Image (tube, coloured by chain):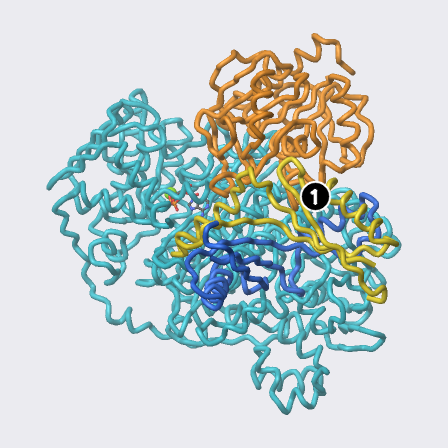
Chain colours: A cyan, B blue, C yellow, D orange
Amino acid sequence: MELTPEAIQATKYYQGLGLTDAEYQLITTKILQRLPTYTEIGLYSGMWSEHCSYKNSKPVLKKFWTKAKQVVEGPGEGAGIIDIGDNQGIVFKAESHNHPSAVEPFQGATTGVGGILRDIFSMGARPIALLDSLRFNEPKTAHDKYLINQIVDGIAAYGNCIGVPTVGGDTAFDATYAANPLVNVMCVGLMDLTNREKGQATGVGNSIIYVGAKTGRDGINGASFASAQFDSKHKSQRSAVQVGDPFTEKLVMEACLDVIYKHQDALVGIQDMGAAGLVSSSAEMASKAGSGMTLDLDLVPQREANMTAFELMLSESQERMLLCIKSGSENEILDLFNDYGLTAAVIGQVTTGHQYQLSHHGEIVADVPVDSLATAAPVYHREKTVPEHILQQAAIQFSPNITEPTQILRQMLQQLTIASKKMIYETYDTQVQTNTIVQPGSDAAVVRIRHTDKALAMTTDVNGRYLYLDPYVGGEMAVAEAARNIVATGGVPLGITDCLNFGNPTKPDQFYELDEAVMGMTAACKVFNTPVISGNVSLNNEFNDVAIYPTPMVGMVGLIKGLNQITTQDFKQANDNVYVVGRTGNDFNGTEIQKLLTGKIGGKLFPFNLDEEQRIQQLILRANRQGLIASAHDISEGGLIVAIAESCFGKDLGVALSSTLTTAQFFAETQGRFLISVKPENKLGFEQLMGRDATLLGKVTNQQQLFVAATDGEFKLALSEAKRLWEGALACSLK
Amino acid sequence: MYLAKIHVNYKRSILNPEAQAVQTALLRLGYQDVTSVQLGKYFELKLTGSQSKEQAAKEVDEICDRLLANVNMESYHYQLEELAVAE
Amino acid sequence: MYLAKIHVNYKRSILNPEAQAVQTALLRLGYQDVTSVQLGKYFELKLTGSQSKEQAAKEVDEICDRLLANVNMESYHYQLEELAVAE
Amino acid sequence: MKFAVVAFPGSNCEMDLVYAIEDVVKEQAELVPSTATDLSDYSAVLLPGGFSYGDYLRSGAIAQLAPIMSAVKRFAAAGKPVLGICNGFQILTEARLLPGSLQRNQQSKFICKLADLVVTNNQTMFTTDYQTQQTIQLPIAHGDGNYYCDPTTLAELRKNNQIIFTYQNNPNGSVADIAGISNRQGNVLGMMPHPERAVEAILGSTSGRELFSSLVNSVRKRGLIHE
Ligand SMILES: Nc1ncnc2c1ncn2[C@@H]1O[C@H](COP(=O)(O)OP(=O)(O)O)[C@@H](O)[C@H]1O
Ligand SMILES: [Mg+2]
């Protein structure tokens, strides 16, 4: 039996659903002026969860810079849209599936991919690429390895099946993610701007159509689950597992795109059912349009018998969409879905007024103002204080003592964050749709836009260690690194999406990290002209009260205006000149070398100059446009020496270089630097353009050796050995 | 030596897309009278180490929990048969 | 109404890569005494149309041959149970 | 000439084939739904890659029951060319138009990479523009690409020159390094690698072009053409 309104109040049942006393008060006294029913309290718990309402993060998200000339649609709809000319737009967004993946790694990852795809095609765009940003523990235990293998398999299973290439991503390893791995997936779609869709339900009498998988009891109230923190005591939360069905999603995607492209006259609005399932999609569609809505839950396609209204509204069964269809056109759309072999049904209507009414078994089970669900959740302005570990930071930079440079290089190449991720991305179909020009393994991935001379560069980046030491500067660096990767391939950055993976916002020192990071990211976005067009917040990433490193994943897309401008990181041929562009400092706090040599990271993060980074990036783009660059690689984790090694591996070419840097400086992670190779005939032109920003290091060679002389020692390693260590490390650690 | 015959199935409330696909295919082939399709995995393991049936059961439980079944969404049951050691 | 309990297994002579993967994983987890792993599929179909057991058997054979098993490499066997029609 | 590209629910390489044929090979290609029953308008039939019916149960098992497959069988029986790529190959084996079957990759993971192949028979309708024993590079992208047949069948395949492509470094455990086989008559070819992904230099390889040009030339030469 369902609890009565009185019993809900007396037992404070709402607390178990994630609502506070004050929130319950607000509903009873201000909004409804009566006690909510069991179904109604469920609706509020889903809609007022962090996942749907952003109640803790809204004030922070407002700080993002979202308006720029190229933005057609900013945050708010399923995903943002950027104009790339020729009446085409690109749509992209990222989504986190951290908690589901910690519980059920394979299905957690698959449903993450499924969810982000729906966000993209519901905008009227065809998904053309996926990227995955993963954070794991250094695999030690069988469970660590199981998590990694299953999460990667899950991403592969869904993306490969549905036929969207997974073209890039990033993977880093740190003990901070041991109990709380991060699984962030980004999708990029391409659309004609004329097909732009909105998730709105307007027009009294128009019909609400449900299409896709039938509703089951899976993931009931997953939105509040995703917003709750983990600890070793709450194993019972583990009921919220959903199974991904990429085959059904493929049919849903093709059918919905068919409706959007060919049945515009019938279609009023379309939205995916994501977090908080049916209630969130329907209430948002009505609220955005200023309409009311009634739904008859008996008409909802159901997989299981005897489901309650609460369960039907809050189920997070996957592969479902909601459409608003003009009255009179219902059969046209139902027939279309039927032809695709999909279940679809009219389940409700747009009404006058602003009430949201649900009936079930002939009774009204909920009758609430629709805006109270969608927009009236309280907003919390959280307190922030500087974390203790930042107050305690030593001001000086760590100074690595490198006695055996070659040996340290060997070890560095095997650090999992640096080692090749081939064994991950080789399990992804990177080529389906036959547009992938630069596959994983270089800096940004490049996907061409068929039948044009344009291409898109895309990447995901963030280094949580930097943010842990300084969330503001680390946030700037995350955006800068993404831009650097785009620029290295020849792209002009267009915009970003993000996944804000943070700890508990009610703890002032953890809220500090979120707030500072967003301000840092915003500062950088303005400098690189990359507005935030979409994103996702994942809070409470903590286990037994310890939060992960603040990890705001940045997903960036850039435009390459001519296919001949596409550049990769691989050295192209012997005798090309090798340069480092940008100044190298003694920047070691938070770096891989600090971690390798001391087993931890610490101290004040090294300084960063955004304008300097932007200036260098502009120079690289200019050199690229003038055709002066043979290869370009951004310098990031592991520093210059790692970038050099990586550029050698692609075409098995060696280098003979010498420099005025110390061996230690070869591991510095100073931002704003590129490793560039230039053909002999372009040497002069390149040097003239770069002036003092480029330092000649030497030449690419045919010898299978990596030889680099520094002031206090040299790196000398057979290429085959270097490559074996770098390519083998990850597989070896997962054995 | 014991032979463990293990069935692993999805829990009732969990979607089984594969079983659903099979049922749809049967419908299309004209088998309208097949009203329900369940689909699970079946394992046979030979255990040579266990001395007693209890010990074998303990090992099988452990193997199922750790590897063969995903207890978040699957349930399992098994039978144990004693085999002549010579095999 | 009949319930068909169907096992589909790889033929003996054929290497089953998935069973092998399970065995390797068991080894890695330390279960050295598991000397053999077989892995197959298990179906339960409810048939509402068949009037007799023979008729049901004929239908199940047909379904297995056409869809559930690839007789190139798999074999199947099944049991039929009569169910109360009310179900 | 006009190619039929059969799209099953869950296929995902059908448009790649259409683009390869129209943009690069410069011939006509039409999508044909799996519910269609007639292929008489076409000179060649292509079964594309992807995950027909999610590859649930077994790859290709449900697709082989689709209405279009009777038409494919008639088309093949008439000696006209049928090419199954990746999932298409799996469907052809499930439909018994080709012997053997495709199992899970040996290492049980999906693999996507450029593979070195050897053209072992250049006498088929699909391979005349290659040299025999020529090494070519085609992308592979599959989870169930591990070709299996019993020893008797393998001996038959060898005797009749039905092994058309082999891997230079076996990526998935296939018997005899098999990457592609034909039927006895040589007009039905199944292959795991994706020639349609290898027709433009900018995508990494052009080794797939000869397969399409061989097919076009053979069809023209044999007068199998339907314009
Ligand atoms: N999880 C992943 N999925 C797909 N590609 C990945 C993944 N992790 C890393 N890669 C690819 O490996 C290459 C190197 O990644 P990374 O070391 O993060 O590069 P960078 O430091 O330049 O950002 C990139 O091409 C990236 O796309
Ligand atoms: Mg990079």
Whereabouts is ligand 1, in terms of quadrant? Answer: top left
Asked whether residue B12 appears in the rendered view, the answer is yes
* Residue located at (29% from left, 25% from top): A576
Left/right placement of residue A51 relative to residue B17 reads: left
In the displayed structure, D202 sits above or below D130; it is: below
Circle 1: is it few (<14), some (14-19), or many (20+) Cα within 10 Å? few
Toward the viewer: A362 or A354? Answer: A362
* Residue located at (70% from left, 19% from top): D81
Determine the image quadrant of residue A10.
Answer: bottom right
In the displayed structure, A502 sits above or below C59; it is: below
Left/right placement of residue D107 relative to residue B40 reads: left
Residue A100 placed where, x, y %? 53, 62
Residue A276 placed where, x, y %? 64, 67
Toward the viewer: D153 or A305? Answer: D153
**Amino acid under disc 1:** Thr
SS at mark 1 in the image: helix
Determine the image quadrant of residue D37.
Answer: top right
Left/right placement of residue A605 relative to residue A66 reads: left
Q: What is the chain letter for disc 1?
A: A
* Residue located at (78% from left, 73% from top): A357
Residue A201 placed where, x, y %? 75, 61
The residue carrying mark 1 is A194
Left/right placement of residue A203 relative to residue A50 reads: right
